[in-house]
Image (cartoon, helix red, strand yellow):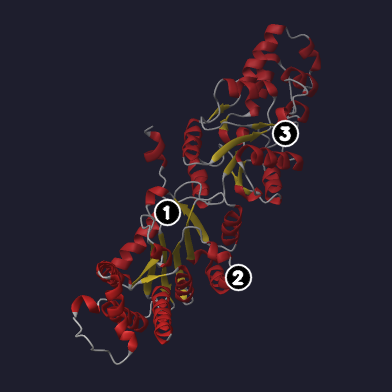
Amino acid sequence: MNNCIEIFVFISMMIIVLISWFRHNANLRRTIAYTVWTFAIFWINTPNFFYAVEGLNAKYSIFNLPFKLYNNLGLWYIILSNILLAFTGEWIGKSWNQTNRVNEKTIKKKFDEFSNDASELRIIGRDLDFLDNKDYADQRAHISKLKNKAMLLCEKTDKKDLIKLYNNLMKDGNRVRYYTAREGIANLKAQIKVDMHAKRSGLFATKIDYSSSQNFFSQFRNKFELSNLDSGFLLQTVSNAFDNIFDNSLNPVIKCIALDLGGVYFDGDLDKFYEYLNDTYKIKIGRTKDDKLNISNKLMLGEINIQQFITEKTTTKHICKNLTEEQWDDILEEWGNTWKPNTNLKKLFEYIGDEGFIIIPFSNLDKDNGNKYIRENYLPACCNEHYFSYENNHFKPSPDAFEDFFEFAKKKYNINFPYQILLIDDQDKNISQAREKEWCTIKFLNGKNNLEYLIDELKKNGILPSKFNFRDELENK
């Protein structure tokens, strides 16, 4: 009975030590664990090394146990004890290489402490979801205070909670971008800081892949290897590499670009069409100031065509009544040639589409021209969908048009939040309406603003990499 109690106590102690070994990183605990466990293994293997004289007994009965088991099991005892000895030797050898390996809870605690005194902070994380955890509210508050001095790199995602988190971080003034698989940093968690004393340091945690390990103990292994770097050439090199990746990374929130056509994407001017009518047919039409395309609600909704519009709008109605069918065909052809896509802008938006952004033309158009643009491939090649006023019975800047466009994009491309849409438009009323709906916006007027201005605005919004160069990327295509 006493032997059973002793065995139970000893085995329980071994299990406790073993669990402690895998749950903690402290050197003292590890040293004790190695010592006790090694003693236990050699105790089990005592019959393999010593021969006991008959009648010789140990002071404590527990030390007689291996010999009793040996006498009962014979060869099987030798085989099992040696397997355990070999396994333990390999196990201990590998474990000494894991002194810097820690679990996820420890990683988060270390990063929380690390960022407290940062005046500048660079963060790499797969999803940054810990910043949405109330347990890390202090770190989140500190990052928010740093505003654009905090640069965060994350993985691209379609998860609603993460998109909302990244949007809130950017509203706080932080700079957030997503990296791509080609960067090769998916398993890295890192923070690089400049502290209040202008000292630079870094904390890096690399996720360890145990996917090929099938043994029982793999589930207890720590998942991250922790490394520290202080000021020096190596850290500066790593920091520069981060900046380079960040400059080439993109907005993790914006997914869809609502692209206006007349005034933004097209070259052309309504005045020239009106001049043609006056010079060729003496038809006079009044001009709406700074209005490139939205010239009649009924025309934009497809309720009337260009011939009916001119007849209603002109102050010289008697001339229109006398025009022949061939002359009206000539006017319709001129009307269709009033706007054409800007070649450079078409290349630019096709490049943006290749980067993974969804581009949906969002424009007030008449039916004749809208059908022509689709038929003759005026739109960027990446545009698989479009939202034209005459097809949807809504026109800008009506709130219904923006609400309906959002529902359209949500259904077609899984757009979950209004702030995932970026409107590029030339009209102040449209820009204001979009902002009221929480869309992102860029005001751009083709002809007044040059291409470089638009590229700079797209870079600020993370739609183009900061190092994007139009000549290098597009002009040689």
Residue 57 occupies which quadrant of the picture? Answer: bottom left
Question: Which circle, 1 or 2, is nearer the viewer?
Answer: 2
Classify 58 as above or below 225: below
Left-right relation of 227 to 108:
left
* Quadrant for the C terminus in the image: top left
Q: Residues within 10 Å of mark 1 (few under 14, many from 20)?
A: some
Q: Residue at x 37, y 40 (%)?
A: 472
Res 131 label: none
Identify the residue under disc 1: 247
User: Which structural element holds mark 3?
Assistant: loop
User: Which structural element holds mark 2?
Assistant: helix
Identify the residue under disc 3: 288
Q: Position of residue 328 (x, y in %)?
A: 70, 12
Q: Earlier in the sequence, mark 3 or mark 2?
A: 2
Q: Is residue 137 visible?
A: yes
* Type of amino acid under label 1: Asp
Task: Give the Cα separation between the discs numbered 3 and 2.
Answer: 54 Å
Circles 1 and 2: CB atoms closer than 8 Å? no
Q: Position of residue 293 (x, y in %)?
A: 67, 31
Q: Earlier in the sequence, mark 1 or mark 3?
A: 1
Q: Residue at x 51, y 41 (%)?
A: 450
Identify the residue under disc 2: 134
Judging depth in this view, the residue of 219 and 464 nearest the camera is: 219
Question: Which circle, 1 or 3, is nearer the viewer?
Answer: 1
* Type of amino acid under label 2: Lys
Q: Is residue 259 visible?
A: no
* Quadrant for the N terminus in the image: bottom left
